[in-house]
Amino acid sequence: MTDNEKLFNSGILTESRPGAEQPPLSLWEGKRNGLVLIECPQRIPCNPCASSCPTGAILPFEDINDTPRIDYEKCIGCAKCVAICPGLACFVVDLTAGGEGRALMKLPYEMLPRPAKGEEVACLNREGAEVSRGTVRAVTEPLKDRTIVVHVDVPRDLVSVIRAIKVVKK
Ligand code: SF4
Ligand code: SF4
């Protein structure tokens, strides 16, 4: 099955399909607080990511159906787009945090119970399969009454793979 067939048959994006791009490593490596990743490859009438971005890093849409375009130089890693995106398609990845071989991911989370700081959570890939465990470093609300954002310490080599978390039953 091709990447396109997989996306349109299953709704699951693959790393190699346009829409799963990442920031240039030269910029990303030194960017404290992280840079946004947006995986929203289909034209749909939706634009709150762009309208809520305080720095203009998500370029203004010319058409409500546009897919997001990003000026990574302007991103400050605030995660407001993560909190407002109804498709849970925005993430922030900080390669400067977490120590050797680690990174910090800021992921949307809409389930209950909420994870707590210090808790171990399961890290899931785009298909919902567990690929690692991570540690919650913070739980924030960048926008009031919107989706919470969970900051998770994860293996750095999995930042292109991890796209969700799950609270692990004790
Ligand atoms: S993380 Fe903040 S600055 Fe970066 S694109 Fe999202 S809303 Fe804009
Ligand atoms: S808010 Fe989310 S779903 Fe809507 S256009 Fe932006 S990234 Fe796509």
Image (tube, helix red, strand yellow):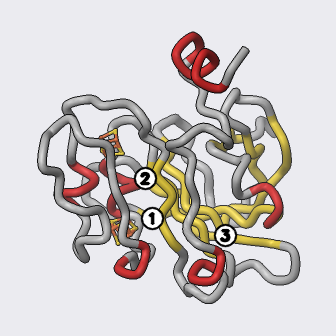
**Image side of residue 111 versus residue 62, left or right:** right
Residue 44 picture quarter: top left
The verdict on label 2 being within 8 Å of ligand 1 is no
Give x and y (percent) for residue 93: 59, 66
Give the CA distance from mark 3 to mark 1.
14 Å
| Image quarter of the N terminus | top right
Crowd around label 3: few <14 · some 14–19 · many ≥20 (10 Å) = many
Return the mark for residue 23: none
Of callouts 3 and 1, which one flags the residue occurring earlier in the amino acid sequence? 3
What's the amino acid at mark 3?
Answer: Leu
Residue 56 picture quarter: bottom left
Which mark lies nearer to you, 3 or 2?
A: 3
For residue 124, above or below residue 100: above
Return the mark for residue 148: 2
For residue 54, above or below residue 166: below
Residue under the point 54% across and 53% down: 107
Give the CA distance from mark 3 to mark 2.
16 Å
**Image side of residue 29 versus residue 64, left or right:** right
Give x and y (percent) for residue 25: 65, 75
What's the amino acid at mark 1?
Answer: Thr
Of callouts 3 and 2, which one flags the residue occurring earlier in the amino acid sequence? 3
Q: Quadrant of ligand 1?
A: bottom left
Residue under the point 30% across and 49% down: 84
Crowd around label 1: few <14 · some 14–19 · many ≥20 (10 Å) = some
Q: Which residue is mark 1?
A: 140
Give x and y (percent) for residue 24: 58, 72
What's the amino acid at mark 2?
Answer: Ile
Q: Which residue is mark 3?
A: 104
Q: Residue lying at the far top in this picture: please name it.
A: 9
Residue under the point 49% across and 44% down: 39
The verdict on label 1 being within 8 Å of ligand 1 is no
